[in-house]
Image (tube, rainbow, N blue to C red):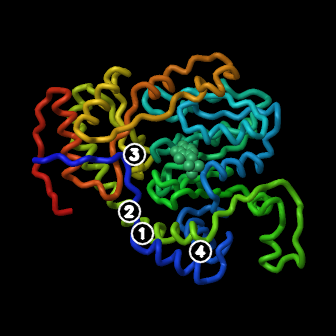
Amino acid sequence: MTSIEIPFNKPYLTGRETQYIIEAVNSGKLSGNGLFTQKCQRFLENRYGFRKALLTTSCTDALEMAAMLANIQPGDEVIVPSYTFVSTALPFIRQGATVVFADSSASQPHLDVRLLESLITPRTKAIVPVHYAGIACDMDKLMRLAEKYNLLVIEDAAQAIESFYKGRALGSIGHLATFSFHETKNIIAGEGGLLAINDERFLHRSEIIWEKGTNRSEFFRGEVNKYGWVDVGSSFLPSEVISAFLYAQLENLEQIQNRRMDLWSYYYEALRPLAEKGHFQLPLIPDYASNNAHMLYLVCNSLDDRNQLIATLKEQGILAVFHYLSLHKSDYYNEKHDGRTLLHADRYSNCLVRLPLFYELTYQAIDQIVNVLYTLYAYPRHAKAIYYNH
Ligand SMILES: *Cc1c(COP(=O)(O)O)cnc(C)c1O
């Protein structure tokens, strides 16, 4: 069998993206908040029960909107996991806040909810849980703490589209939530994002911040007869070209998700015997959480193990990657950090590896990847009959 090169990711086009872009171009309205933007927003509100959905040019932008809406100020503290992408913390830093980094838990890269209470001070304003790999944080515990201390919860649901906590859509539970449609996520627009607003206190102001600090959205709806500068804000709207692309993806959301789930399960079953032998850990999905097949990650037993695994896969033309250097140790923040050691965040930084997972990945390719792991760990693979006709 000849082996093929396997990339880490490949953006998938469902077919109608360019058609809808042409429709947007022909409509003569290319700027933001047009027909495709509104179609996407209605779709997401209806499917997930958000009070309001506003498309943005990225999840980073949506988090910036959230930080402005939360009125984060110098002197405020915001609790963020250390094991996450820069964008989870950056918007709060830009507002002048101190970010207090939380450790991951022993069993999951997610922030350890049991440690949260010890990080809350009178200055704490918000908690930003990350639903890592699209797997929910323990939201009941988190929301209870937020209520007790009067804190805002901003869900970083960048990876968490079509994933649920006890049957409730992620992004519909916190006061605010953000999603990403970056090309590495399940549903894509190249670059793109979403702010979900669930707390009615933020409904009005969110539109103003979205529209450069003006009340233009009200003007468009005929609610006021002129519009002007009324608040802070920025230009957070994507153009209709991006929204048109995104709408084609959303129309095929179930097809995309079904395929990813099949691939994820196939991988998981194939790798389980190696995990049971202790060569690495597979993702844990608690009873309260669902899986959206955003990511297939392994946690190796050491940094050396992970380096060897990535190098061995690379020799076979397979691109596996690691991510997230703990933010509390970053060049930018390490001087500002309060000095606590965050053992588990560091462990995931050193030991976690992501295997290729994308819509057009084949079962044969997964077999090729899995076989490299069986060979590396010198463990015979008793492969079940594989049905390649999917
Ligand atoms: C991808 C990602 C982001 C950033 O999303 P962009 O749309 O690229 O700005 C933020 N947080 C997490 C957890 C992510 O995975």
Compared to residue 372, the image places residue 198 above or below, namely below
Report the front residue among 83 and 129: 83
Report the front residue among 106 and 72: 72
59 relative position to 279: left or right: right
* Label pair 2/1, CB-CB below 8 angstroms: yes
Identify which amino acid the numbered label 2 is placed on. Ile
Disc 1 and disc 4: Cα gap in Å? 15 Å
> Which part of the image, by quadrant, shows the C terminus?
bottom left
Residue 314, image x, y percentages: 28, 36
Circle 2 sits on which residue? 256
Query: From where the camera sits, is residue 147 visible?
Result: no
Residue 344, image x, y percentages: 49, 24
Ligand 1 neighbours mark 1 (CB distance < 8 Å): no
Residue appearing at x 58%, y 83% in the figure: 26
Q: Which of pointers 1 and 4 lies earlier in the amino acid sequence?
A: 4
Residue appearing at x 38%, y 62% in the figure: 256
The kind of secondary structure element at disc 3 is: loop
* Label pair 1/4, CB-CB below 8 angstroms: no
Disc 3 and disc 4: Cα gap in Å? 28 Å
Compared to residue 298, the image places residue 193 above or below, namely below
Q: Which of pointers 3 and 4 lies earlier in the amino acid sequence?
A: 4
Q: Which of pointers 3 and 2 lies earlier in the amino acid sequence?
A: 2
Circle 4 sits on which residue? 36
Disc 1 and disc 3: Cα gap in Å? 19 Å
Tag nearer the camera, 4 or 2: 4
Compared to residue 368, the image places residue 171 above or below, namely below
The kind of secondary structure element at disc 1 is: loop
Circle 1 sits on which residue? 252
The kind of secondary structure element at disc 4 is: helix
Identify which amino acid the numbered label 3 is placed on. Met
